[in-house]
Every structure is written in C-alpha cells, then in structure tokens.
C-alpha cells in the first residue's frame, strides 16, 4: 500500500518538473541516439571518452535535480 502511494506521489510530482530537468533529459536521449546511430553497423557499441564524459555529466545533473 505504501509503494502504491509513493508511486502515485512520484507521478504527481513529474508534472511539476523544471524545464532544466526536461532539457537535460532530452539532451541525454539525443546523445544516446547519436552514439547508437554512429555505431549501427558494428556488433558492439563502443563509447568514446567524450561520449562517456557527456553521459556522466548529464546523468549526475539529473540525479542532483531530482
């Protein structure tokens, strides 16, 4: 029952996310798509240094905001 109310509260709070959070999340998804499209023909996706750095920075920013 507690989990139900916690998830209900979390969904309610999603409506009031800041624009900064949404923009960061979109940037993260665009970067992931760029990486996957670049490596489409290969069997295994390999992330470069700047790809990893960008993803880490955005992920930490999203974790701090939430």
Image (cartoon, rainbow, N blue to C red):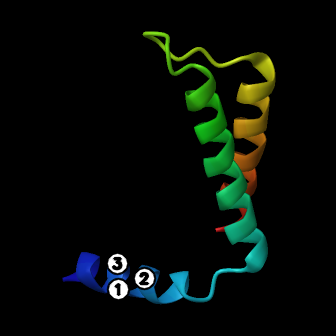
Quarter-of-image position of residue 54? top right
> Which residue sits furthest front?
41
Residue 13's place in the image compared with 23, above or below, is below
Q: Residues within 10 Å of mark 3 (few under 14, many from 20)?
A: few
Q: Is residue 37 left or right of residue 8?
A: right
Tell me, yes or no, whether the two marked residues, 3 and 2, touch with CB atoms within 8 Å.
yes
User: In this orientation, which residue lies closer to the viewer: 1 or 49?
Assistant: 49
Secondary element at image label 2: helix
Measuring from the top left, give residue 49's x and y in whole percent: 78, 18
- Residue found at x 74% / y 66%: 23
User: In this orientation, which residue lies closer to the viewer: 6 or 43?
Assistant: 43
Secondary element at image label 3: helix
Measuring from the top left, give residue 20's x and y in whole percent: 78, 71
Residue 1's place in the image compared with 45, above or below, is below
Residue 34's place in the image compared with 19, above or below, is above
> Which residue sits furthest top?
43
Secondary element at image label 1: helix
Measuring from the top left, give residue 64's x and y in whole percent: 72, 60
| Residue 50 - label | none
Tell me, yes or no, whether the two marked residues, 1 and 3, touch with CB atoms within 8 Å.
yes
> What is the spatial separation of the Cα atoms under label 1 and label 3, in whole angstroms?
4 Å
Q: Residues within 10 Å of mark 1 (few under 14, many from 20)?
A: few
**Quarter of the picture holding the C terminus:** bottom right
| Residue 8 - label | 1
> What is the spatial separation of the Cα atoms under label 3 and label 2, in whole angstroms?
6 Å
Q: Which residue is mark 2?
A: 11
> What is the spatial separation of the Cα atoms under label 1 and label 2, in whole angstroms?
5 Å
**Closer to the observer: label 3 or label 2?**
2
Q: Which residue is mark 3?
A: 7
Tell me, yes or no, whether the two marked residues, 1 and 2, touch with CB atoms within 8 Å.
yes
Measuring from the top left, give residue 25's x and y in whole percent: 65, 59
């Amino acid at each position: 029952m507690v989990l139900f109310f916690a998830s209900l509260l979390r969904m309610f709070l999603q409506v009031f996310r800041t624009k900064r959070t949404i923009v960061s999340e979109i940037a993260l998804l665009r970067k992931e798509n760029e990486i996957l499209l670049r490596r489409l023909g290969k069997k295994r996706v390999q992330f470069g240094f700047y790809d990893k750095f960008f993803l880490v920075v955005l992920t930490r920013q999203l974790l701090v905001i939430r």
